[in-house]
Image (cartoon, grey):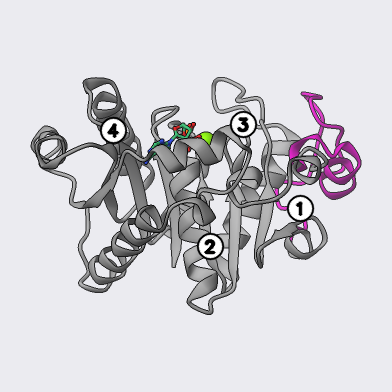
């Protein structure tokens, strides 16, 4: 299973990505969690202590690595560099482990306009492709709303794009925008998850607002989940009900992926 998670900022992408990663570990799978959001904070949601989470250097700013692999210094334009740098050793060498989840933090990359590509983005793009196409682990990728930098070949290897929404028009508008991007880059399956849902009426509001994206399920607004974030703890240990709801969504996702739903 290769799962990408997107949605408007603050809807709960990281919270849900972390729970999915932990659930797959508990089911006995090897799991790679990829923090592909420039505003990276998946580590603490996975339960990595703050001191350790703060030590992680995102791959994009590992200048020596970028230079060694691509032959060019990061942030330097107009240089020649390898478009297909070696990446197969990166997951093992540069990941941190938290509760048996392997975590890779990608970091922020300049998005040059006009199709321009820089050395660090060549490295990250190749790494994403490697993780999604060539490795056997379950991959859970925490992304921002902009998913276009996945690139075509990589996007096709994503089994499911989960778009997290919360009751309200803003995250719904973002979901429409993400759906359009997903279609443009060739993502095969896209699903909705409602988060911070307070009641049945709010779940129905989300389903009705986006009738053309299959709705996997809802996660309730939870004081315990919010508290866990305040304390810098993983929501996974904080609220059994939350974990059960994410597990139900995981099972729905497995079913839907098997039944071959396509965009
Ligand atoms: N189901 C929920 N109930 C209550 N608070 C939640 C829930 N899901 C997420 N949150 C809180 O919302 C905030 C944003 O969540 P986060 O996962 O960081 O969002 P994103 O990654 O989409 O920006 C965090 O403070 C988090 O604890
Ligand atoms: Mg996040």
In three-dimensional space, the C-alpha distance between marks 1 and 4, rounded to whole angstroms, equals: 39 Å
Q: Is mark 4 within 8 Å of ligand 1?
A: no
- Location of mark 3 (residue): 38
**Magenta region:** 59-87
In three-dimensional space, the C-alpha distance between marks 1 and 3, rounded to whole angstroms, equals: 22 Å
Residue 238, position in %: x, y? Answer: 50, 51
Q: Examine the rendered structure and indicate whether residue 253 appears above or below residue 190.
A: below
In three-dimensional space, the C-alpha distance between marks 2 and 1, rounded to whole angstroms, equals: 31 Å
Mark 2 or 4 closer to N-term?
2
Q: Characterize the magenta stretch by its predominant secondary structure.
A: loop
**Within-10-Å neighbours for mark 4: few <14, some 14–19, many 20+:** many
The numbered disc on residue 117 is: none
Tag 2 secondary structure: helix
- Location of mark 2 (residue): 22
- Location of mark 4 (residue): 166
- State yes or no: residue 85 in magenta: yes
The numbered disc on residue 85 is: 1
| Frontmost residue, 59 versus 182 | 59
Q: Quadrant of residue 261?
A: bottom left
Residue 248, position in %: x, y? Answer: 29, 63
In three-dimensional space, the C-alpha distance between marks 4 and 3, rounded to whole angstroms, equals: 21 Å
Q: Examine the rendered structure and indicate whether residue 251 appears above or below residue 86.
A: below
């Amino acid at each position: 299973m290769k799962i990408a998670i997107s949605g408007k900022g603050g809807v709960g992408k990281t919270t849900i990505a972390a729970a999915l990663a932990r659930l797959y570990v508990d089911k006995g799978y090897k799991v790679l969690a990829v923090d592909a959001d420039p505003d990276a904070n998946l580590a603490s949601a996975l339960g990595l202590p703050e001191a350790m989470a703060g030590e992680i250097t995102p791959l994009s700013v590992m200048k020596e690595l970028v230079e060694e692999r691509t032959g060019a210094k990061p942030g330097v334009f107009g240089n020649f560099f390898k478009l297909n740098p070696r990446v197969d050793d990166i997951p093992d060498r540069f990941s941190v482990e938290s509760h048996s989840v392997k975590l890779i933090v990608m970091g922020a990359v300049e998005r040059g306009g006009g199709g321009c590509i820089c050395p660090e983005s060549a490295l990250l793009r190749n790494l994403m492709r490697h993780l999604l196409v060539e490795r056997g682990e379950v991959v859970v990728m925490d992304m921002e709303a902009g998913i276009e930098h996945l690139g075509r070949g990589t996007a096709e290897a994503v089994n499911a794009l989960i778009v997290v929404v919360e009751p309200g028009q803003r995250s719904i508008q973002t979901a429409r925008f993400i759906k359009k991007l997903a279609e443009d880059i060739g993502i095969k399956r896209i699903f909705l998850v409602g988060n911070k849902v307070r009641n049945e009426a709010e779940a129905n509001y989300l389903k009705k607002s986006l009738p053309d994206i299959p709705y996997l399920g809802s996660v309730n607004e939870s004081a315990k989940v919010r508290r866990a974030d305040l304390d810098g703890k993983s929501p996974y240990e904080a609220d059994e009900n939350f974990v059960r709801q994410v597990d139900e969504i995981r099972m729905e996702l497995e079913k839907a992926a098997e039944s071959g739903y396509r965009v």
